[in-house]
């Protein structure tokens, strides 16, 4: 029998099965990957505090696992808060400017076979119906497939230009394919990595 005051009560539906905590691990992922939009003055509801994020734990897990939100290998496991002294500093609002890449725009509808080698820096959305979802994949001539971008439920309010973290070098004969192909109109941005 536990001594008085040493027994922590745990509700039956809130079983803690993980050593990961909000304060030490999860907050760092949220601050790095989500806080640009999920903040009090952001485009979406705030997730900067444990009290704000905890009610959304299962929904966040589902969004991440379905890759509707940036994949971060999140786990739920009861979502304990942990030691608040381990929290990182609250991130400052990011100044988000719509990316504008210098480079040649190569239009495509559904798929494109390159006639010359290209250094692909990103993609620019063309005319697409709201709610359009697709994956864009580069298929190299050696059979290698390189995922480029995954759009779930395209929104007219979203950015129209997506810059890749690293340019993708494709040889002549490589294909860039959208899955599904119907209704996907884009422009591949090729060239150097200079910005306007």
Image: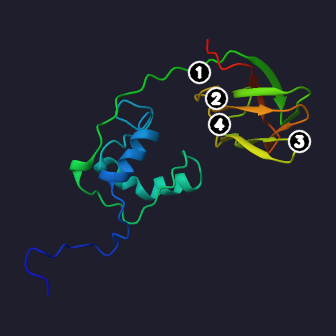
Q: Which mark is residue 141?
A: 3
Sequence-wise, which precedes: disc 1 or disc 4? 1
Image spot of residue 86 (x, y percent)? 25, 49
Sequence-wise, which precedes: disc 3 or disc 4? 3
Q: Which residue position is annotated with label 2?
A: 162
Image spot of residue 107 (x, y percent)? 82, 24
- Crowd tier of the residue under label 3, counting other residues whose Cα lies within 10 Å: few below 14, some 14–19, many 20 or above: few
Q: Are marks 1 and 2 in contact (CB under 8 Å)?
A: yes
Image spot of residue 150 (x, y percent)? 67, 42
Q: From the viewer's side, name the closer residue of 154 and 80.
A: 80
Residue at left 31%, top 61%? 80
Name the image quarter holding residue 142.
top right
- In the picture shown, does residue 80 fall above or below 158? below
Residue at left 42%, top 46%? 29
Q: CA distance from mark 1 to mark 2?
A: 7 Å
- In the picture shown, does residue 83 fall above or below 164? below
Q: CA distance from mark 3 to mark 4?
A: 29 Å
């Amino acid at each position: 029998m536990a001594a008085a005051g040493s027994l922590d009560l745990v509700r039956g539906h809130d079983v803690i099965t993980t050593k990961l905590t909000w304060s030490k691990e999860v907050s760092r992922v949220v601050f790095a990957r989500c806080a640009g939009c999920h903040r009090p003055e952001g485009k979406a509801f705030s997730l900067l505090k444990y009290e704000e994020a905890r009610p959304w734990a299962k929904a966040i897990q589902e969004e991440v696992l379905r890759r509707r939100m940036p994949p971060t290998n999140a786990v739920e496991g009861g979502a304990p808060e942990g030691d608040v002294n381990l929290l990182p500093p609250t991130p400052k609002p990011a100044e988000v400017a719509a990316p504008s890449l210098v480079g040649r725009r190569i239009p495509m509808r559904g798929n494109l076979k390159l006639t010359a080698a290209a250094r692909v820096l990103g993609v620019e959305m063309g005319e697409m119906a709201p709610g359009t979802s697709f994956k864009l994949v580069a298929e190299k001539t050696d059979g290698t497939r390189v995922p480029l971008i995954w759009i779930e439920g395209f929104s007219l309010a979203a950015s129209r230009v997506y810059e890749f973290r690293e340019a993708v070098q494709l040889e002549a004969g490589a294909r860039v394919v959208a899955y599904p192909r119907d209704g996907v109109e884009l422009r591949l941005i090729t060239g150097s990595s200079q910005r306007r």
